């Protein structure tokens, strides 16, 4: 299996490494960074397990989960975490989290574009979808700017912070991606 490396105009996605645990903890352990995610802040042990699972998923055959470090182009430091998990019917769900210091810079949109490039251009998927917290308006803008369409609401989708929370779903289809293919997004990956 060749490691995944996708590059965009400002960002790249690479495989997660053991040394990424501290940078990932700065995101997943932060109450502000996880406020709209489907889980509460993680402990160091939990983040270490996420790092280990991410590395193991890269070696699975067949590979069904792509857990990737988001980095600035030309740098190595993790500034975010992206995930694409394949599903039956040539589909996948995506999600990502950026360090709060990186919010508001358009990096989320570029991350979604990179995940779509992986899913459509490399994996040959037909549909990619994402879900967000109803209160996360920044995520709504990001997903729409990336070319996704709002599909609807899943009621009581996740139990977080002691209560059930709905999720708003978005998707993009292969032919929609082809029409909006983003210049400057390149992939290096073999199945």
Image (cartoon, grey):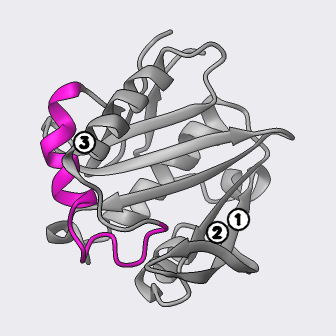
Q: Earlier in the sequence, mark 2 or mark 1?
A: 2
Residue 45 picture quarter: top left
Residue 100 x, y percent position in the rendering: 20, 71
Q: Is residue 116 above or below residue 145?
A: above
Q: Which residue is mark 2?
A: 148
Residue nearest the observer in this picture, 130 or 174 = 130
Q: Which residue is mark 1?
A: 171
- Residue under the point 63% across and 35% down: 121
Q: Is residue 98 above or below residue 65?
A: below
Residue 147 picture quarter: bottom right
Image quarter hosting the C terminus: top right
Residue 112 x, y percent position in the rendering: 48, 57
Q: Is residue 122 left or right of residue 37?
A: right
Residue 148 x, y percent position in the rendering: 64, 69
The numbered disc on residue 39 is none
Q: Is residue 37 above or below residue 128?
A: below
Q: Which residue is mark 3?
A: 45
In the image, which residues are magenta?
Answer: 18-38
34 drawn magenta: yes
Residue nearest the observer in this picture, 161 or 113 = 161
Residue nearest the observer in this picture, 177 or 165 = 165
């Amino acid at each position: 299996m060749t490691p995944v490396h996708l590059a965009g105009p400002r960002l790249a996605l690479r495989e997660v490494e053991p040394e990424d645990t501290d940078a990932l903890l700065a995101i997943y352990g932060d109450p502000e960074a996880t406020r709209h995610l489907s889980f509460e802040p993680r402990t160091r042990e939990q983040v270490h397990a996420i790092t280990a699972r991410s590395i193991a998923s890269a070696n699975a055959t067949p590979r069904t989960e792509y857990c990737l470090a988001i980095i600035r182009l030309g740098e190595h430091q993790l500034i975010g975490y992206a995930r694409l998990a394949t599903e039956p019917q040539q589909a996948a769900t995506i999600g990502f989290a950026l360090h709060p210091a990186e919010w508001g810079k358009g990096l989320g949109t570029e991350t979604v574009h990179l995940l779509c490039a992986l899913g459509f251009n490399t994996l040959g998927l037909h549909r990619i979808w994402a879900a967000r917290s109803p209160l996360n308006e920044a995520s709504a803008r990001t997903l729409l700017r990336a070319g996704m369409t709002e599909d609807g609401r899943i009621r009581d989708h996740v139990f977080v912070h002691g209560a059930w929370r709905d999720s708003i779903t978005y998707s993009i289809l292969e032919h929609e991606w082809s029409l909006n293919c983003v210049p400057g997004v390149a992939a290096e990956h073999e199945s």
